[in-house]
């Protein structure tokens, strides 16, 4: 594939050279626009670009007053909220390096990242996060400052408000001078991978990586533009959310931050009415499963989806819609499409999904309803993204085409390789892993896939997830697991069968959904273990397993399943913060249950 020239920033973009001067330029260029909104009580509060610039200046100079200097590392442990963004840009403008830490991490996981990155200061959300660090403080000798977003009664801790007060004594010239010292080659972030197969590795991403990724993004017609609204609930410790954070501010868009409650995501969407919604598949899976389960006529629902896809394809190509199709479409608009769009606020221009696979049926459903969910693909090592489906050029079942300036090809074994300006510099303190991952400038992603005749990239699985049965059949479990999760009552399906005679699955129930279902059938939902053993529950799951098996050949069918008495979670070490299953840990933890399914 030919290497394209670097993308040209859009007219609305700041034209920054680094992430440090980005916020400084945005505060000037987008003056008068709203940079962010957040919920306080019952009201949504707006923060202007001028206010954002001033807050960042205070934090940056405040960090300087604490002795944080060019190249120092500062960790952030907090939910996605405006203060995360303030702190992030404050760190970058001080010439320091941001080290994101998932707020759901255990004390030991926090200790590993903070110690390995050699962070000198940690910005924590509240007393609960502070308690984690206190628990492992004996193993963090390099920490010089603890700062909390929400004030805590601790004389050894500085509040973010106090840090800002320390920075108010500095001048605009001091701030500009600090920003001016930052070079494109400086490290912007150490982002630690989720660690599905071992300890997290710190990805070194410099300012040039991010800036070039933003330029690629702005080359596209389907991304955020000035004055549009992006709703953000994704963890800012993850590269996906950081790209949205940087990209929105670069072009003068508004970031609406969630209320830090998963149950408030849909209500928030309906209130802020965003035009752009980045998400992981789980949100779309739950809405889809709910819509399908509540449809009184499944055949009619599928007909409406097929109709919606057909009509919207005609509209996209600028072709005339026949009168009979238009009449049926208008009826479906009233009965289904409009209601689904209403769940997203009714103003969605585009939703984007990534970080994990999503079933094609789900994408077609939302597209039919007028909520184009475009699947993209990338990893932390590509500074978030490498490919994307565009609204004017997409193919469901693929992860789209490469961004301008990104090359994608496949190795002999089917592994996806990527090359471009957005490829990270390597793993911090891990030269061996870096040499294994970047070979002759090509990033070896670990994902398996193919590139079709139209240039769309298709991901078929992970090299490390391949199941080789006792009969020698190579099977990628992703499709089977995605199909299982289309049942609204199933939260996870983990397929197993390496060196075994047939495939089995561990199933978990969605605690939010299964309770009402069980109560309607007179089943006690208060005892998860009894619920998992209940014959009605097993029969319901068996129907889904049978439907999945009908889609594949005998060798790929699930012969047995076990329902676990609880959901998988990050707290129990079974999921990453982005809700990916830590397959090896699950296999090890439930070895007894898995072995039982192979007993005669």
Image (cartoon, rainbow, N blue to C red):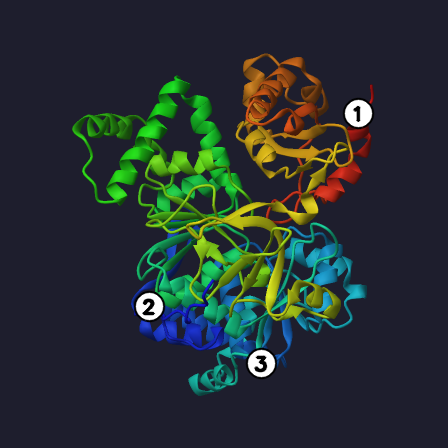
Q: What element carries label 1?
A: loop
Exactly how many numbered labels are in the figure?
3
Q: Can residue 333 be seen in this view?
A: yes
Q: Distance between the residues labelled 2 and 1?
A: 58 Å
Packing grade of label 2 (10 A; few <14, some 14-19, many >=20) is some
Above or below 392: residue 594: above
Q: In which quarter of the image is the C terminus?
A: top right
- Disc sitting over residue 123 in the figure: none
Q: Quadrant of residue 250?
A: bottom left
Instruction: Name the residue rendered at 40%, 47% in the picture.
Output: 351
Packing grade of label 1 (10 A; few <14, some 14-19, many >=20) is some
The x and y percentages for residue 543 are 58, 18
Q: Disc 2 or 1, which lies upstream in sequence?
A: 2
The x and y percentages for residue 142 are 75, 73
- Depth check, mark 3 against mark 1: the one in front is 1
Above or below 193: residue 568: above
- Disc sitting over residue 64 in the figure: 3
Instruction: Name the residue rendered at 18%, 31% in the picture.
Output: 322
Query: Who is closer to the viewer here, 199 or 248?
Result: 199
Residue labelled with disc 1: 598
Packing grade of label 3 (10 A; few <14, some 14-19, many >=20) is many
Q: Is residue 68 left or right of residue 422?
A: right
Q: How far apart are marks 3 and 1 (CA)?
A: 61 Å
Q: Disc 3 or 1, which lies upstream in sequence?
A: 3
Q: How far apart are marks 3 and 2 (CA)?
A: 33 Å
Q: Is mark 2 on a helix, strand or loop?
A: loop
């Amino acid at each position: 594939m030919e290497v394209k020239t670097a993308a040209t920033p859009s007219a609305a973009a700041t034209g920054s050279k680094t992430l440090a001067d980005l916020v400084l330029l945005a505060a000037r260029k987008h003056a008068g626009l709203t940079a962010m909104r957040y919920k306080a009580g019952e009201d949504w509060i707006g923060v202007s670009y001028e206010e954002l610039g001033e807050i960042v200046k205070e934090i940056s100079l405040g960090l300087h007053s604490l002795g944080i200097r060019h190249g120092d590392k500062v960790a952030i442990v907090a939910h996605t909220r405006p203060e995360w963004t303030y702190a992030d840009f404050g760190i970058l403008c001080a010439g320091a390096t941001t080290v994101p830490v998932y707020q759901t991490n255990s004390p030991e996981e926090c200790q590993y990242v903070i110690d390995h990155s050699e962070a000198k200061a940690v910005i924590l959300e509240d007393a609960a996060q502070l308690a984690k660090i206190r628990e492992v403080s004996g193993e963090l000798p390099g920490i010089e400052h603890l700062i909390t977003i929400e004030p805590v009664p601790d004389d050894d801790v500085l509040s973010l408000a106090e840090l800002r007060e320390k920075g108010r004594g500095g001048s605009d010239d001091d701030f500009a001078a600090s920003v001016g010292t930052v070079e494109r080659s400086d490290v912007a972030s150490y982002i630690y991978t989720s660690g599905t197969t071992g300890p997290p590795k710190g990805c070194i991403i410099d300012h040039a990586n991010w800036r070039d990724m933003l330029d690629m993004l702005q080359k596209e017609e389907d991304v955020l533009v000035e004055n549009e609204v992006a709703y953000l609930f994704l963890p800012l410790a993850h590269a996906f959310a950081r790209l949205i954070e940087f990209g929105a501010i670069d072009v003068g868009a508004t970031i609406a931050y969630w209320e830090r409650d998963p149950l408030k995501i849909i209500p928030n969407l309906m209130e802020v009415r965003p035009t752009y919604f980045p998400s992981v598949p789980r949100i779309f899976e739950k809405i889809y499963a709910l819509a399908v389960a509540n449809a009184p006529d499944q055949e009619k629902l599928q007909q409406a989806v097929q109709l919606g896809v057909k009509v919207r394809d005609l509209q996209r190509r600028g072709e005339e819609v026949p009168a009979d199709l238009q009449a049926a479409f208008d009826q479906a608009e009233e009965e289904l499409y409009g209601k689904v769009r209403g769940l997203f606020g009714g103003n969605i221009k585009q939703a984007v999904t990534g970080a994990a696979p999503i079933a094609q049926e789900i994408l077609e459903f939302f597209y039919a309803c007028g909520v184009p969910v475009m699947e993209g693909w990338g990893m932390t090592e590509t500074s978030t993204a490498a490919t994307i489906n565009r609204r004017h050029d997409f193919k469901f079942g693929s992860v789209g085409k490469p961004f301008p300036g990104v090359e994608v090809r496949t190795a002999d074994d089917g592994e996806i390789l990527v090359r471009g300006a957005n490829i990270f510099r390597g793993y911090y303190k891990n030269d061996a892993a870096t040499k294994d991952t970047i070979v002759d400038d090509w990033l070896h992603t670990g994902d398996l896939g193919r590139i079709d005749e139209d240039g769309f990239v298709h991901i078929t699985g992970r090299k490390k997830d391949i199941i080789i049965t006792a009969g020698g059949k190579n099977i990628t479990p992703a499709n089977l697991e995605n199909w299982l999760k289309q049942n609204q009552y199933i939260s996870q399906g983990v397929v197993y069968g390496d060196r075994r005679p047939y495939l089995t699955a561990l199933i978990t129930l969605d605690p939010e959904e299964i309770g009402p279902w069980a109560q309607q059938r007179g089943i006690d939902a208060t005892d998860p273990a009894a619920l998992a053993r209940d014959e009605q529950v097993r029969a319901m799951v068996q129907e889904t397993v049978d439907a999945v098996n009908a889609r594949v050949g005998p060798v790929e069918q699930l012969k047995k399943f076990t329902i676990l008495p609880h959901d998988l979670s990050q707290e129990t070490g079974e999921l990453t913060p982005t809700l990916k299953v830590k397959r090896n840990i699950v296999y090890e933890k439930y070895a007894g249950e898995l072995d039982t399914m192979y007993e005669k």
